Amino acid sequence: MEQLWAHLIKVQPDPDPWVVGVSALAALVLVGFRMPWQVSRGLITIAHEGGHALMALVTRRKLEGIRLHSDTSGVTLTRGRPTGPGMVLTALAGYLAPSLLGLAAAWLTEKGHITLLIWGVLLFLVCMLLLIRNLYGALILLATGGAVFALIMYAPAEVQQVVALVAVWFLLLGGIRPIIELQRKRRRRQARDSDADQLARLTFLPGGFYVFFFLLVSVVSAVFGAYLMNPL
């Protein structure tokens, strides 16, 4: 156990500035262009639904399962009081989760704990797999988890570092775009059951306030995460 823990917490050297820059550019391409975003957006959905699930457990709601769909949407099924702080916090957690996870990952990266970060991601995916309730979601998690496991087992430390950097930037930047897309759908009245609108029904604040709050937290997380990732 001591050897395993020592392996997990070992510190890798700081990446070259150009590696950080190229990683950020790669993540920007994934988030900013339509085709790569359609392919990679499901990873943000995994983080989103994981945020709902984690908060449901923290607030002691009964977690019945998670579903991930081929259109990159998802749903987390919980049971408990339909109103109250637990329900509000569970609804709040989804859109905040990718950015906050990205910020935590940026902090680990800044400390040089790349190995711990990658193993943490694998553990997160395994926990999600235990909660998944549809075949497509299980296949996506198995494929993603398998890729992460292969990265741990077979990729050299330099490759692991680059992949981790791209993943961190992707979470920081990718946490923003779904919020912008949400507001566009709300303007067209196509998202009546969105997290923001559910929160509006649960509280005295309008849905637009929650969209603004989601965006504010995500942008601040991205800025602070970028500051942590700055190699200079």
Image (cartoon, helix red, strand yellow):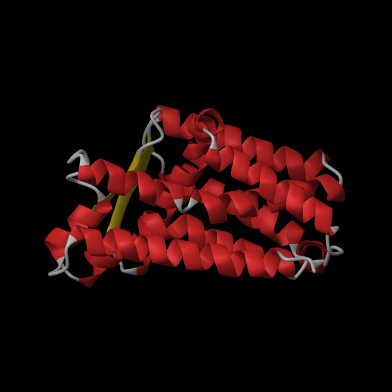
Picture layout, residue 174 above or below residue 221: above
Identify which residue is drawn at 86% across, 58% down.
16
Q: Is residue 82 visible?
A: no
Q: Is residue 36 left or right of residue 51?
A: right
Q: Is residue 163 left or right of residue 32?
A: right
* Total number of numbered discs in the rendering: 0
Q: x, y percentage for residue 30? A: 59, 39
Q: Is residue 16 left or right of residue 53?
A: right
Q: Which quarter of the figure has residue 191?
A: top left
Q: Which quarter of the figure has residue 74?
A: top left
Identify which residue is drawn at 76% across, 62% down.
8
Picture layout, residue 232 above or below residue 19: below
Q: x, y percentage for residue 118? A: 69, 53
Q: x, y percentage for residue 51? A: 41, 57
Which one is in front, 24 or 159? 24
Image quadrant holding the C terminus, namely: bottom right
Identify which residue is drawn at 30% across, 58% down.
211
Picture layout, residue 118 above or below residue 88: above
Q: x, y percentage for residue 86? A: 25, 68
Which one is in front, 97 or 209? 209
Q: Is residue 98 left or right of residue 19?
A: left
Image quadrant holding the N terminus, namely: bottom right
Identify which residue is drawn at 37% across, 49% down.
180
Q: Is residue 44 visible?
A: yes
